[in-house]
Amino acid sequence: MSLALELARRINAVRFDELPPVVVHWAKVGILDTVGVTLGGSDYAGAGILAEALATSAGPALIFGSGRRVGALDAAMINGIASHALDFDDCNNTLGGHPSAPILPALFALAEQMGTSGQPVDGGEFIAAYVVGFETECKISMGVNMYQYTRGWHPTATLGVFGAAAACARLMGLSDDQTATALSIAASFSSGVKSNFGSMTKPLHVGHSARNGLLAAQLAKGGFTAGPLAFEHKQGYLEVFNGKGNYDIDKILPHWGQPWDIVEPGIAIKTYPCCGSTHPALDVMIALARENDLQPDQVERIDSWTHARRLEHTNRPDPRTETDAKFSVQYCLARALADRKVVIGHFEGDAYKEVRIRNLLPRIHAAAYTTAQFPEDNHFGAEVKVTLRDGRVISGKIDQPHGRTSANPLPAQLLKDKFVNCAQSVLPDAQVAQLYAAIETFEQLKDIRDLTGLVALPVRNSMRPAVAA
């Protein structure tokens, strides 16, 4: 039996009422965080450019943070790019990327389309679909990563498209054979290279994956065909993306649901709106600055060490755009020292040009850490050493950033604060409170459109004025 069909059987075997409560809890955490960051990113310039390029026509699915409703495929793509625009969306250690952003925009668009067609989707069914999409992309990742990540593929996209296809197939009630076909179609939609990090194309990867995962499921439902051995064929996904000896197909299926990846290692909630590879160093730098009352004019030099795999795309000593700044560990550390926080406003407009921050950049040096600093299998640690002008040296290290796993979760109040801060950039306070309450009891929803109605603003003639993130 093919890998696609084996995955399909597992996808369709999942029932909401059989999911453990802890799975439902973490699913709601992922939904809350993703809805929040999607609203926060709905003003993103790239989303506006995309909407204009698509020349969208009226349809059933909402563009988050607006009053516009368009076709489900367009909504999945536009909301997908918005969900990743701030680089504030959740992560997962198994995936090596962002698990929820490729899935949830597709599911919301599909659920609205189904509701309009007389098949309202309830909260339980939606959660079950989300969980299997999350599990699919993560378990495939177990067979191909961290090779893909190191090679230069963007796993959020190259694997996220399978999560979106699986979730949409499950919500649509496709048969095992149809679901396998959707996954095989998605294998030809998989794409995304890390050379585009620091540009609008990185969040486009997510929008592309959300749209194409949904499209793959729709095509499969309509009878579209695909190669049954799309993964294991000699010219299939595994050989083409990884190459012989760089993947292990036998790692993909045995741990399905044991544990559920959404629970362990779980959803990593980002506390800063920038590349997750900078976060360990930021946690250390902010703690050092606060505990020692550090001031920029006291500092002679800052040395930062992160894993080589993470330094590869964050060693940017001279960021030239606001998006580039999100991937500059030097810029982010400068903000952490000077402001003792890293927030959305630090990556908007010309903030990256601020003179007091630019003056710090030559003093900040980034390098890959050695096995003497951290175990070889730890690629989420960081060490920061601050040398002061008076000769004193202050340093600290961390094994992983706050909120990186379910064993080290972000406190509930901080999660809520993040959601509110993102949502309030678009919605009135009262509506934000209603939306938060609806997500808290998400599994009780009778129709997902009752929630998406709370994400909408009155109809406008155009997208809101956009800012690049």
Image (cartoon, helix red, strand yellow):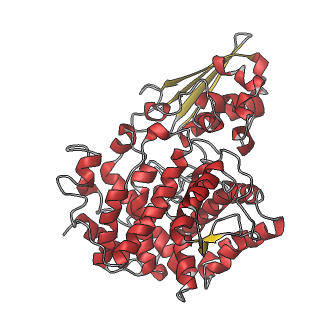
Quadrant containing the C terminus is top right
Residue drawn 56% across the image and 29% down it: 383
- Give x and y (percent) for residue 163: 42, 63
- Residue 57: quarter of image: bottom right
Residue drawn 72% across the image and 73% down it: 454
Q: Nearer the viewer, residue 456 or 166?
A: 456
Quadrant containing the N terminus is bottom left
- Give x and y (percent) for residue 341: 73, 38
- Residue 138: quarter of image: bottom left
The answer to whether 214 is drawn above or below residue 358 in the figure is: below
Residue drawn 64% across the image and 54% down it: 48
Residue 227 left/right relative to 417 = left
The answer to whether 26 is drawn above or below residue 110 in the figure is: above
The answer to whether 92 is drawn above or below residue 109 in the figure is: above
- Figure disc tally: 0
Q: Nearer the viewer, residue 292 or 187?
A: 187
